[in-house]
Image (spheres, helix red, strand yellow):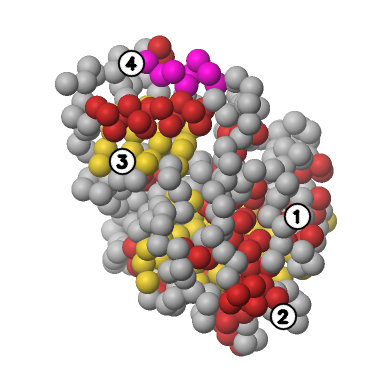
Amino acid sequence: MRKPAPSSSSSRPWLALVGALTAGLATAPAAAEPAAELAAAAAARPNVIVIVADDLGYGDVGFNGGRDLRTPRLDALAKSGVVATEGYVAASVCSPSRAGLMTGRYPQRFGHENNIPEEPGNNNLGLPVAEKTIGDVMKAAGYATGAIGKWHLGQAPVFHPNRRGFDEFFGFLGGMHDYLPGRASQIERNGVPVKETRYLTNAFGDEAADFVKRHRNEPFFLYLAFNAPHTPMQAPPGYLARFANIADPTRRTYAAMVSALDDAIGHVADTLAENNLERRTLVVFLSDNGANKTYGGSNAPLKNGKASLYEGGVRIPFFLRWPGTLPAGRSDDRPIISLDILPTAAAVAGANPATKPLDGVNLLPYLRGTNQGQPHDALFWRRKGSAAVRVARWKLIEPKDNDEKMYDLATDPDESADLLSREDSTATTLETRLAAWNRQLVPPLW
Ligand code: CA
């Protein structure tokens, strides 16, 4: 029998190693293609749209079994693509999750481990400029690039999306924003303040549809990062009226905000169809982290939520849809992560993904079925003194100030039965993997 791990930090070899200089980053697994078909697809320079929801819970979309909310547009898109039922993000809060998506690298490798403090002029608080973004990669490949919505990767001019690979930006630079017109506004277009009169989620959908229309005759990359359904909880009366059946007013507002999000994404989908772009556009959808249950979200059937390294914090709604290239009506339970989006988009564009080693992999061979293996042999998380690792069905978690635990996600997705002492050798393997990963990281920059 394995001894229960003491709760002191001495039981966590990685903690002592945090801050150790990395001797060399892990080598990213090699992409298993390009096959001739994909090379041909890349020659056609298909478009890529990455749609991010904010604090949307795993269980709050119809395609993951949500019942009281209604997401028909998202469900239809998901049904025409591949749903990743075990899709993850690299962090359980907004800013580091986005830093991972933007770079294809674990954000803890470059100190972007925590949310950015709200100091708009601070040149040290943002996605480090030594990191290349997905916008940089797609722009260098000749794509028209746009970012719409919430940025949350630094508010100083040096971090502005227009300087991080995006030709166009419409949205706000901070971590949250009012939705209703007439409230405080930091909305801008390419650095110029805009007086916005639309419900913000509708505005982002309109702007995205307009971007697609304007660039329909050239390859484009659009990063569409809604702030819905993140706080403040604000929905227009017409949307609230759709959910009169939900008694809890917080849940009702959350449902209304998600419904507006669904409509806005439907607007983008309609625009793709109207312009005959569906078969030449990869659409990726995910949430940046799990829902905050205090504000009406649900991560059912997963444990905990936003800010936690349990599944409810980091496993999120996730699908990829590309009619004619990816299969339709499939779900795939192999674990993937938001870090895979950059190398996947780069493969679509035939672009050189990056100059630094990536943690993500090109998902296309896996989703198309030409590679039956696992995209990742391990996934890792670290935040504020807690850390976790997933290898195959096993997840080991080191909660801050608490005993190490291990769960079998295949039989226990809500992480209720700690198997650490029963599965001693597996636990040792996972501890070793986690410690090795931690040795490659740097301390948080803020
Ligand atoms: Ca978030």
The image's mark for residue 394 is 3
Q: Residues within 10 Å of mark 1 (few under 14, many from 20)?
A: many
Quarter of the image with the N terminus is: top left
* Residue 144: quadrant of the picture: bottom right
Q: Residues within 10 Å of mark 3 (few under 14, many from 20)?
A: many
Task: Please give the residue where the numbered disc 4 appears in the rendered image.
Answer: 7
Is 385 or 186 nearer to us in this picture? 385
Q: CA distance from mark 2 to mark 3?
A: 44 Å
Where residue 160 sits: x, y (%)? 77, 48
The image's mark for residue 136 is 1
Sequence-wise first label, 2 or 4:
4
* Residue 202: quadrant of the picture: bottom right
Sequence-wise first label, 2 or 1:
1
Measuring 34% from the left and 52% from the top, which residue is drawn there? 298
* Secondary structure under the numbered disc 4 in the rendered image: loop
Q: CA distance from mark 3 to mark 1?
A: 36 Å
Q: Residues within 10 Å of mark 2 (few under 14, many from 20)?
A: some
Sequence-wise first label, 2 or 3:
2
Sequence-wise first label, 4 or 3:
4
Q: CA distance from mark 4 to mark 3?
A: 21 Å
* Residue 416: quadrant of the picture: top left
Q: Nearer the viewer, mark 4 or mark 3?
A: 3
The stretch of residues the image draws in magenta is 11-18
Q: CA distance from mark 2 to mark 1?
A: 20 Å
* Secondary structure under the numbered disc 2 in the rendered image: loop
Q: Nearer the viewer, mark 2 or mark 1?
A: 1
